[in-house]
Image (cartoon, helix red, strand yellow):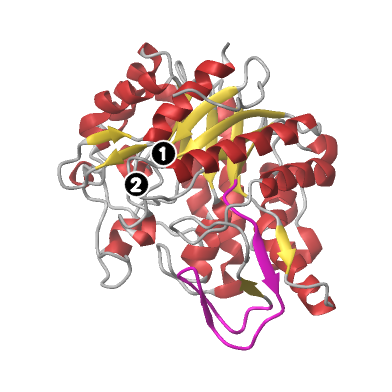
């Protein structure tokens, strides 16, 4: 598939990849322990289409086919996640041993994420010792895979896991704690810091985290809207980036955390080799409106000190998310300006969109626009080292079940047949052009 207007060339050594997560694609639920998502999906009404991830894409049994798809795509790297519940089962690391071997044989760099929301059932992020248990699990994984894995991710999107799973209750474990969920954020950040130490103790290098970030735009320039947008930006962006990059919580939030925050921040702020940013869309925020609203399937309680508003004008994905490539440039340059030399090199660890169909010109246009926006950030002086598309294949999209399709590869969830989409061919050609 020829590109009529080639994307500008990225520097040599720029890392091109795709991403997935264990619970969303692996299946083989009977070969691992239960996770909080298994408990959550068993509750009627929790998942849009009533589905579960017991089979999902059956990646555990079909990973050879999926590695062949990665090799055919021509990516440098594959970001997958390791399932803590699978590791806890007998022989659980055997699957990841085989997967890493196959990736290396195919010339694809394995980039494991050590936690992507599938907490073992019975553990709770409200409890501090979950962070210590996580560090022990990380040491076990690193001891088994560290001879072949050279790039690591500790956590994926602790902001969403805190907000959606513990504050608003629409993801697992389904808790609706509102601001009482803040200790969950702290314990995940502590788990990250302990994991960095465990990885380094095992000899691992090239360690990062994947946080979700995006610009927050006030609904108007009225003082109340500007203040509400600033508070939302604090929760989405600064609550997780400030402790990692500056070693402090913003605006006194540390007082709401549990434990010895000062000592914990020394662990949380362990230096990173790179910082991962997952970007999908900006958010428009205004003053509270006094009533509970449904925004994109997320029930926003009336008592919150802000309200999320619709962004009008841009095209939207099948998920209803606005398509705003220039906001990717904005969040990257904002981070560069906000954190200066405290910001390590950046990798865009997720970027993608939900559209139906194997012939998917909308996804091609989305990826083309965002990769160009990424190049503009590079030209503006942001030290960007890599880009990962979400996702390799259609999968179990959390509370949406199988109703959303983010993949470059179509999956028939009745037969599990994989069919590369037009966007797969487009991305493959882009990578060939980037390599000259």
Disc 2 target residue:
24
Mark 2 packing: few (<14 Cα in 10 Å), some, or many (20+)?
A: many
230 w.r.t. 155: above or below: below
Where disc 2 sits, the SS reads helix
Viewer can see residue 59: yes
Q: Are marks 1 and 2 in contact (CB under 8 Å)?
A: yes
Residue at (61%, 50%) from the top-left corner? 189
Disc 1 target residue:
20
* Bounds of the magenta segment: 279-305
Front residue of 278/102: it is 278
Residue at mark 1 to residue at mark 2: CA–CA distance: 7 Å
Residue 210 position within the rendered picture, expressed as x and y whole percent measured from the top left: 57, 42
In-image side of 88 versus 292 (left or right): left
Residue 217 position within the rendered picture, expressed as x and y whole percent measured from the top left: 73, 63
Residue at (50%, 57%) from the top-left corner? 161
Front residue of 143/65: it is 65
């Amino acid at each position: 598939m020829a590109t009529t207007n080639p994307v500008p060339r990225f520097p040599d050594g720029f890392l091109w990849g795709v991403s997935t997560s264990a619970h969303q694609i692996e299946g083989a639920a009977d070969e691992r322990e239960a996770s909080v998502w298994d408990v959550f999906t068993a509750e009627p009404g929790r998942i849009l289409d009533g589905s579960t991830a017991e089979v999902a894409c059956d990646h555990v049994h079909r990973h050879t086919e999926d590695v062949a798809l990665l090799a055919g795509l021509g990516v440098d790297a594959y970001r997958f996640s390791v399932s803590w519940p699978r590791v806890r089962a007998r022989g659980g690391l055997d699957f990841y041993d085989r997967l890493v071997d196959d990736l290396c044989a195919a010339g694809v760099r394995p980039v494991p994420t050590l936690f992507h929301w599938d907490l073992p059932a019975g553990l709770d992020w409200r409890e501090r010792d979950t962070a210590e248990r996580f560090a022990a699990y990380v040491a076990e994984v690193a001891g088994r895979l560290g001879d072949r894995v050279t790039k690591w991710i500790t956590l994926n999107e602790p902001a969403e896991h805190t907000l959606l799973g513990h504050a608003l209750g629409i993801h697992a474990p389904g808790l609706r704690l509102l601001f009482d969920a803040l200790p969950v954020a702290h314990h995940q950040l502590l788990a990250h810091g302990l994991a960095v130490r465990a990885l380094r103790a095992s000899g691992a290098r090239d360690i990062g985290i994947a946080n979700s970030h995006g610009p927050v735009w006030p609904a108007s320039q009225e003082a109340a809207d500007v203040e509400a947008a600033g508070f939302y930006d604090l929760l989405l962006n600064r609550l997780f980036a400030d402790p990692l990059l500056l070693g402090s919580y913003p605006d006194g939030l540390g007082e709401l955390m549990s434990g010895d925050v000062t000592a914990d921040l020394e662990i949380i702020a362990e230096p990173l080799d790179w910082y991962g940013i997952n970007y999908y869309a900006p958010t428009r925020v205004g003053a509270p409106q006094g009533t509970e609203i449904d925004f994109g399937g997320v029930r926003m309680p009336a008592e919150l000190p802000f309200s999320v508003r619709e962004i009008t004008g841009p095209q939207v994905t099948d998920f209803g998310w606005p398509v705003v490539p220039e906001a990717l440039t904005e969040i990257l340059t904002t981070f560069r300006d906000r954190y200066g030399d405290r910001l390590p090199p950046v990798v865009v660890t997720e970027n993608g969109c939900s559209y139906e169909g194997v012939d998917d010109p909308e996804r091609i246009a989305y990826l083309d626009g965002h990769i160009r926006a990424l190049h503009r950030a590079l030209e503006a002086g942001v030290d960007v080292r890599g880009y990962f598309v979400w996702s390799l294949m259609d999968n179990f999209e959390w509370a949406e079940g199988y109703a959303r399709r983010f993949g470059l590869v179509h999956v028939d969830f009745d037969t599990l047949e994989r069919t590369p989409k037009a966007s797969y061919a487009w991305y493959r050609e882009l990578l060939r052009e980037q390599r000259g």
